[in-house]
Image (cartoon, helix red, strand yellow):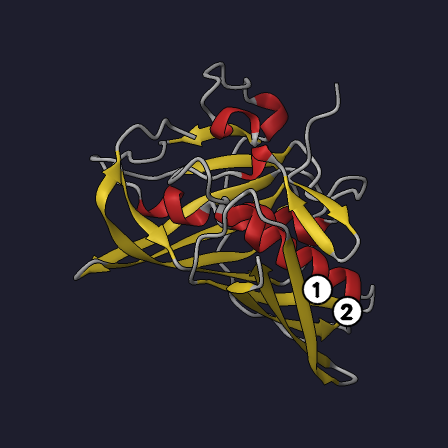
Amino acid sequence: MKKEPFFAEQGDAFIPQPISNGPWNPDSMHGRVVVGLLAHVIEQRHGSAEFVPARLTVDMFRLPDIHTPVQVTTNLVRDGMRIKVVEAEFFSGGTSMARASCQLLRRTESAPGKVWSPPNWDAPLPDTIPAPTDPRLGMNGKWTTRPIVGHMGSLGPRRLWMSEVRELVHGVPMSPFVHVATGADFASPFANAGDQGLGYINSDVTLYLHRLPATRWIGFEVVNHHATDGVAIGECWLYDEKGPIGTATVAALAQRKPMTNVPPP
């Protein structure tokens, strides 16, 4: 049986499906599908094979519900030979809920010479890791994971593989950009959860890519978390099965009641 997509398209609107709900409220939308839909529309309207979506920033300042149709508007701010800048806005019931800025850079040749880079991680490939048996993992089938080391809330290194298991928009296969953009929101709970649960809700996601993923599995490695006065930042390095592809960073606010029933990913 084909898995339910996160959205159905109806004219110029996207209709949220029940599977699009998030962890904070069963009637509110998951941040991952907000980010994914903005990436999808930007790519559909303004993407091309000659350009890499090198940076996507999404500000999420309201929680949309899963019962109201969504519209996304875009504006091409700069249409240059080497750089394009696109803005997009996410509306639910006519109210602005989120906005995005995407920078697309033209593919050329890398600069000559050698530049130091961190080494590739030494993670086992996802096909060599047994699938989790806990049905709560991946929020009951919204996505799938292959844990490598640590888990959400463990005090120490955290690494895992993640893959999408359903279409974002019905009838539209996920592109590599939409695939990694949809998953990028996971940087917040993975980096910001602690030994008393997930106490932060992210207000943004910024995805940096030097190349698009070439495989369906995306690796997440937590490399940073700091918090002061209820304001947190978190960062994950991102990989595919061939090596590093970029980073996902988030800003987050402390929730008064931490989510304590979050299972390991």
Q: Residue at x 50, y 29 (%)?
A: 138
- Name the element at disc 2: helix
Which amino acid, by three-letter code, is at mark 1?
Answer: Ile
Q: Is residue 72 above or below residue 219?
A: below
Q: Residue at x 62, y 49 (%)?
A: 180
Q: Marks 2 and 1, how far apart in space? A: 6 Å
| Quadrant holding the N terminus | top right
The x and y percentages for residue 39 are 65, 58
Residue 244 seen in the current view: no
Q: Which residue is mark 2?
A: 46
Q: Which mark is residue 32?
A: none
Mark 1 and mark 2 in contact (Cβ < 8 Å)? yes
Which amino acid, by three-letter code, is at mark 2?
Answer: His
Q: Does residue 265 appear left or right of residue 238 in this picture?
A: left
Q: Does residue 169 appear left or right of residue 116 in this picture?
A: right
Q: Which residue is mark 1?
A: 42
Q: Name which quarter of the figure residue 125 lies in.
A: top right
User: For mark 1, does the 10 Å Cα neighbourhood hold few (<14), some (14 to 19), or many (20 or more) residues?
Assistant: many
